[in-house]
Image (spheres, rainbow, N blue to C red):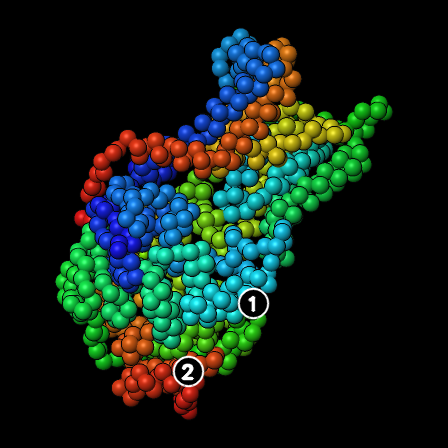
Amino acid sequence: MKNVLKRIIFGPKEKEKYWWINVLVPIIAILLALVVGAIFIKLTGRSPIVAYKLLFGTSGLLPGPYWKDHFAEMLLSTSMFVATGLSFAIAAKAGLFFIGAEGDFLVGGITATYFGYAKPFANMPTFIHLTIIFIFVIIMGGIWGAIAGYLKVKKGIHEVISTIMLNWIAVYLIEDWLVIGPMKANVKTGISGTPYVSNTARLPIILHGTRLNISIIIMIIVTYLIWFLLYRTTFGYEIRAMGYTLIYGMEAPKAGGVDIDKRMIQVTFLAGAVAALGGAFIVLGILFQYPPVFGGGYGFDGITVALIGQNEPLGIFLASMFIGGLRTGAAAVQLAHIPKTFPSIIEGITVAFIALQELIRYWLMKAATAKKKSYVKIQGGADE
Amino acid sequence: MKALEVKNIVKQFPNVLANDHISLSIEKGEIFAVVGENGAGKSTLMKIIYGLYTPTSGEIYVFGKKVKIETPEDAIRLKIGMVHQEFMLIPRFTVTENIVLGDEPHRGMIFDYKRAVKEVRELSERFGLKVDPTDKVANIPVGIQQRVEILKILRRGAEILIFDEPTAVLTPEETEDLFKALRRLKAEGKTIIFISHKLKEVMTIADRIAVLRRGKLQGVVEKEKTNEVELARMMVGRNVVLEIPHVEAKIGKTVLSVRDLTVKNKRGIIGLKGVSFDVHSGEIVGIAGVEGNGQAELVNALIGFTRPVKGKIELDGKEIKLLTPYNLRTKGMVYIPEDRKRRGIVLPFRVRENIIMGQHTLYPFSKNGILNDSEINKFATKKLEEFDIRPRNIHVRGGNLSGGNQQKLILAREMSIEHKFLLASQPTRGLDIGAMEFVYKKLVEEKKKGIGVLLISLELSEIMGLSDRILVLYNGEIVGETTPDKTNEEELGLMMLGLKRQERVLQ
Ligand SMILES: Nc1ncnc2c1ncn2[C@@H]1O[C@H](COP(=O)(O)OP(=O)(O)OP(=O)(O)O)[C@@H](O)[C@H]1O
Ligand SMILES: [Mg+2]
């Protein structure tokens, strides 16, 4: 039993000799981005040290004054980035370039709003109310995502095209119809949006005195579940096989009995559902209603974190904390007379370095093998 | 004069010492063959010479000068060219466009297609490599595509040409043509390095032959002073008898029945026309034919990749209506694909993952959709041993196995799935004689176990040696049915080329 548990939690021990390279790549990319950022700041005649001190001091990533508040804010946005990051990564593992998280996020948000204020549910205990809301969020987000998979399978429409269109359809459907039409709050004043969700639909706070709620715990669990799904189940086995082969037109998984069409639709459902969770978090934990205009962008931030996190669940979680930290600390850099968009520049440069990862890998590999001038004959190899 | 010299080349991969102090020197104007078992390190050595891999240690001299080859560009600059086994041509381009790509003749800023065509035509005549410069590459057979590859490297001024298993994908006629071209190139003073598993070919074409075994150079012999048997012994380290033990077939009930099967090919043209035949348990039915005469369509229909236009397929007495590759496995059919890299394995997957593909949903490898790693590892370890797959490491990625070991992996996997019918499509393509012997042994074992085997092969000797019954496929139709003792290679050859037909009565 203990062994089974250990296996489930830690997975197989794979003897990857240079596994640490995978870990170092994003770290090096981030460090390089910070160096480039520092040069920029220096060139404009300001002090990079002061700027970074402000940035990271208030990011919630490092202890400092008012750490509790920053830490809470950082984790609050982390959970949303994790949602959209995982959404991109799951599909990417199956060989899809799925950029529909933006739309799924909104669909999740509006679904959570509706079931949050709708009368029949409003007086239930919090736990049951939230459970019902999340079930519908997952179903609606999943269906919205699966449309892209369905179109790809049945009509051969590339997922990039369909997800971009679905994103816009979601925006117009929600913001230009639902929010100002059927779901409009019944108030006389100008500003409105939808009604506020009932108290039983608000995510319980886990750190007193802050806004930090259970969304981060949910995402820790979801991250683990996605990892488990990818690496410990036949479903994950099949979609990874698809991801490795489909873009090259190879047919091994198909010949091995994988029902590619079905898996494609399932994967897009999952990607949509996970992204929709993020939308639910922002409504149920921060805004408590669906505002007239939703400051979007989380969907595309998801691509950023997935790239930095190398499409691995744990990597995405850490990358989300990093991006969450940058966003949290953004306001403070203004004290050093640096625009608060500066952290976005760091993000962009990091992604640029990630794009150069083959080069970074090459350097690391060279460094790793250079030390050993003489070769070692390994037992049990082809030469035994 | 020495064209190429390598000294003490060592290549250490994480798990394998692929080249162990190899030193060779190759004269200008000779055809130099390299032979060795699957995984002996032949491709690795060639890739080092062509700049695709950097050696762990060792030196390379080209025309007497010490050189460092770090990329294929370096190699091309040093007049070394390589014809890869998978051609790197752009299907939608014409022959000419493919050949001049990267170094196009131009007038001013404009690509001068006319001149390019003329250049290609001249080049093709000069070396006796006939191509039609205006054909689209997608529409020409493999043999011609290979010529395009050769012309491409010749145009770049290659003096040393490396061929990694060039004949594995060719028909006997195409091989003949290739050899003519190689002799012509030799007469022009080009140096040729030639890798092959077919010792007969090596004995025909090579001047000298190097034998590699498990990363080490066993020796270099002159063609005149050796023979196939000795070469095989040097390669494998023991005597190999590639003769197939004759086992009387104990014919049982029908396991596969195909009636009036008509199938379209990828281009939408009927490629298989109303084919009918049966395979019984305990027999090997061989399908002989020149590549492209309906084999691919037959295979695709049998494994559920293409829906037949009409016809019926029955497996073990039950008609299969909605074919999918998955339900075929559950109904007792397994498949050894002709193109292992495309259809057989997932290259980045580890051996342990590849070896359960197709049965990954079954107990004990998974239960309720959750994989059981210790069972998978146990199974993989056992199969590596049983099928002698090297290296004995279940964590190696499929793409890092040598071709022969990939094939053994597929064999190990498919044969361990419970089945009544085995579809073996060119199961020995690219295998060394040791591995070939192994495959033959396994196929005969299958037959003894009462499994029905459909063997599709381009090698006549294989068809003659293994089959209990032979069907000849020509132009999408079965033009003859015979048995090995009633026919000979000549007669089969005539039927394969459509020059002879036999009436067939199906019971
Ligand atoms: N990129 C790689 N990484 C790790 N191991 C490798 C790699 N390429 C080859 N090998 C290993 O090196 C050994 C030699 O492989 P190589 O491809 O040179 O064999 P080969 O002689 O060409 O065999 P075949 O006749 O089957 O093509 C094999 O054991 C193989 O598994
Ligand atoms: Mg090879």
Report in which chain the residue with disc 2 lies. B
Q: Along the line of sight, which residue is nearer the eye, A171 or B349? A: B349
Q: Amino acid at mark 2?
A: Leu
Q: Seen in the image, is A43 located left or right of residue B11? A: right
**Residue A242 sits above or below residue A345 on the image:** below
Residue drawn at (52%, 53%) of the image: B103
Q: Name the residue carrying label 2.
A: B497
- Distance of mark 1 from mark 2, alpha carbons? 27 Å
**Residue B252 sits above or below residue B303 on the image:** below
Image quarter in which the N terminus of chain B is found: bottom left
Image quarter in which the C terminus of chain B is found: bottom left
Residue A214, image quadrant: top right
Residue B367 pos. (x, y %): 38, 49
| Image quarter for ligand 2 | bottom left
Residue B97, image quadrant: bottom right
Q: Along the line of sight, which residue is nearer the eye, A47 or B412? A: A47
Q: Examine the rendering and report whether any part of residue B6 can be seen.
A: yes
Disc 1 on helix, strand or loop?
loop
Tell me the crowding category of disc 1: few under 14, some 14 to 19, or many 20 or more residues within 10 angstroms, Cα based.
Answer: some
Disc 2 on helix, strand or loop?
loop
Report in which chain the residue with disc 1 lies. B
Residue B127, image quadrant: bottom left
Tell me the crowding category of disc 2: few under 14, some 14 to 19, or many 20 or more residues within 10 angstroms, Cα based.
Answer: some
Q: Amino acid at mark 1?
A: Thr
Q: Nearer the viewer, mark 1 or mark 2?
A: 1
Q: Name the residue carrying label 1.
A: B134
